[in-house]
Image (cartoon, rainbow, N blue to C red):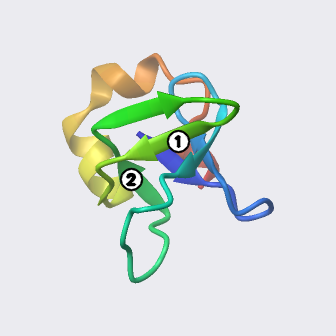
């Protein structure tokens, strides 16, 4: 799961706070504020693929255990 960093335009992976980019061939109408992804490819950068936009409320309701392990907290959104 990743959150859009509005200052830099990249994403921050919630679990460990590292910066990531959406894979170049991904087609989106707009950058989602919060997303889940199916895979990450690590080159000189971290690229996330298989993006699905999600709402903060969905994650709070469905993923309590996961949120407790994250470096970045959704309260900061």
The secondary element bearing badge 1 is classed as strand
Image quarter (top left, top right, bottom left or bottom right) of the C terminus:
bottom right
Residue hosting label 1 = 47
Residue lying farthest right? Answer: 7
Position above or below: 42 against 76:
above
Q: Is residue 43 left or right of residue 58?
A: right
Residue lying farthest left? Answer: 62
Position above or below: 23 against 7:
above
Return the x and y of residue 43 as percentages of the image width and height: 61, 29
Q: Which mark is residue 29?
A: none
Return the x and y of residue 58 as percentages of the image width and height: 24, 52
The secondary element bearing badge 2 is classed as strand
Return the x and y of residue 73 as percentages of the image width and height: 57, 36
* Residue 65 in which image quadrant: top left
State the residue at coordinates (70%, 31%).
44
Residue hosting label 2 = 35
State the residue at coordinates (41%, 28%).
67
Residue lying farthest bottom? Answer: 29
């Amino acid at each position: 799961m990743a959150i859009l960093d509005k200052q830099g335009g990249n994403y921050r992976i919630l679990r460990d706070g590292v910066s990531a980019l959406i894979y170049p061939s991904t087609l989106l109408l707009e950058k989602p504020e919060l997303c889940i992804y199916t895979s990450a490819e690590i080159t000189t950068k971290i690229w996330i693929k298989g993006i699905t936009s999600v709402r903060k409320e969905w994650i709070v309701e469905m993923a309590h255990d996961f949120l407790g392990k994250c470096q970045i907290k959704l309260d900061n959104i």
